[in-house]
Structure formats: structure tokens, C-alpha cells
Amino acid sequence: MKTLTVTEVARNFSSVVDRVQARQEEVVLTRGRKPVARLVPEPALLNALEVFGDLFRTMDDAAASELKAAVSGNRLRQSGRLSELRDPWAS
């Protein structure tokens, strides 16, 4: 983890961001020798299958079996319908 002053970062912002991205390195910004902010690299993007796999591995056996059965059952259908989706923000 690198520590830079706010002034140093302001003067070299583009190169600091390039370093954070290229080296996946976190940078702590200081003002008056006190940490005030952090620049952290964005995590790598995951596709839906990778996210689903991570979720599946966190479940107990019963929940994983139920989820697997639900997904397998939905695969038998040809396609879903937009009208079947529920708006989570609707009251």
C-alpha cells in the first residue's frame, strides 16, 4: 500500500490512477500526515456464472439442492416472459 499526500496526487492524478489500475495497488491519501481517503482498484468483473458459482459454494447442502432443482426445472422451459418478472421497487 502506497501513501501519498493530497498535493502529490493532485499534481500526478493520471499517473497515480494508472498505477492503481496497472498494479492493483491501493493508495492512501494524506493531508497533514493524517489519512483522509483511499484510492482502491476496481475488482475484476465477473460474469453471471462465476457469481452464481460463488453463491452456490456458500450454501448448505439443502439450499444448494433446492436451488439446483429450481434452475434445472427452469431450463426445461423454452423462454421466460417479461411479464413474469416482478418489479422489486413497486409497492
Image: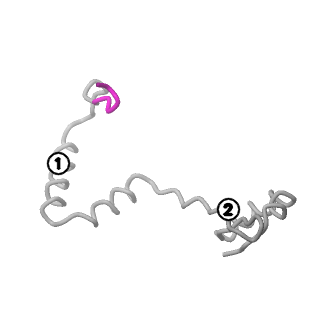
Whether 80 is drawn above or below 56: the answer is above
Q: Which residues are magenta?
A: 86-91
Quadrant of the snapshot with the C terminus = top left
Within the magenta stretch, is there residue 47? no
Image-quadrant location for residue 3: bottom right
CB under 8 Å between discs 2 and 1: no
Instruction: Point out which mark residue 36 bears.
Output: 2
Q: Earlier in the sequence, mark 2 or mark 1?
A: 2
Q: Give x and y (percent) for residue 54.
A: 35, 63
Q: Give x and y (percent) for residue 77.
A: 20, 37
Quadrant of the snapshot with the N terminus = bottom right
Of 84 and 35, which appears nearest the observer? 35
Whether 78 is drawn above or below 69: the answer is above
Instruction: Point out which mark residue 27 bears.
Output: none
Q: Is residue 86 left or right of residue 42?
A: left
Q: Main secondary structure of the magenta part?
A: loop
* Marks 2, 1: nearer the viewer: 2
Q: Give x and y (percent) for residue 37.
A: 66, 61
Within the magenta stretch, is there residue 87? yes
Q: Which element type, helix, strand or loop, lies under badge 2?
A: strand
Q: Is residue 74 left or right of residue 7?
A: left
Residue with the mark numbered 1: 70
Q: What residue sits 12% from the left and 62% below the top?
A: 62
Question: What crowding class fits label 1: few (fewer than 14 Cα within 10 Å), some (14-19), or many (20 or more)?
Answer: few
Q: Is residue 88 left or right of residue 62?
A: right
Q: What residue sits 17% from the left and 48% below the top?
A: 70
Seen as rendered, the residue at the extreme bottom is 1
Whether 34 is drawn above or below 81: the answer is below
Of 34 and 18, which appears nearest the observer? 34
